[in-house]
Image (spheres, rainbow, N blue to C red):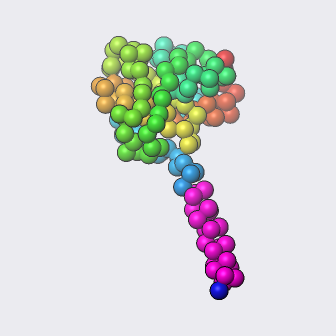
Amino acid sequence: MRSIIRSLAAPALGLVLALAGMAAHAQHTPETLAGTKVVTAEEVQKLQAAGVPVIDARVANEYAEEHIKGAKNVPYKEKSAKSVDFDAKQDHFDLSKLPADKKAALVIYCNAGECWKSYKASTVAMRAGYTNIHWFRGGMPEWKSKHLPVE
């Protein structure tokens, strides 16, 4: 009887561990975010050249390591789920560090893919009344792949 239980338990444990690993793997951000304009690295470069502020929503140590040249760090500190229905009350984003003019253009980025900081920061900014947000979904990976300036 014990050998039968052991032979059944091993595959079941493997399945449980595999499912747990899949659940731990965060999903990627959506392709779009209603109320924002998704922009490419080249568009960010043009917007920045026109004086549009670029906001890096990553944590301070990531920003210190490397960021888009001229970008300002306004970290999105997240504790909420990485999903479109995240609970912003669990997170912190200092809106006072964004431009006072809520109609002015603004670019927000992070590390793309599984990094939800720029998605969440853009969402929180929109909820606060910002109306001209450019979400740079490709973030640092896209910027660096184009060999654009970093500091």
Residue 61 spot, x, y in % from top left: 62, 23
Which residue is painted at 67% across and 77% down in the image? 6
Q: Is residue 48 left or right of residue 91?
A: right
The one nearer the camera, 114 or 33, is 114
Is 13 part of what is drawn in magenta?
yes
Q: Which residues are magenta?
A: 2-22
Q: Is residue 35 left or right of residue 135?
A: left
Predominant secondary structure in magenta? helix
Residue 69 occupies quadrant: top right
Residue 79 visible in the current orientation? yes
Residue 66 occupies quadrant: top right
Residue 59 spot, x, y in % from top left: 56, 26
Q: Can you say which quadrant of the picture contains the N terminus?
A: bottom right
Q: Is residue 128 left or right of residue 14?
A: left
Residue 48 visible in the current orientation? no
Which residue is painted at 62% across and 26% down in the image? 62
Which residue is painted at 64% across and 34% down in the image? 141
Q: Is 33 located above or below residue 20 in the figure?
A: above
Is 68 part of what is drawn in magenta?
no
- The tally of labels here is 0
Residue furthest toward the bottom? 1
Which residue is painted at 62% across and 34% down in the image? 142
Q: Is 115 located above or below residue 105 in the figure?
A: below
Q: Can you say which quadrant of the picture contains the C terminus?
A: top right
Residue 16 spot, x, y in % from top left: 58, 65
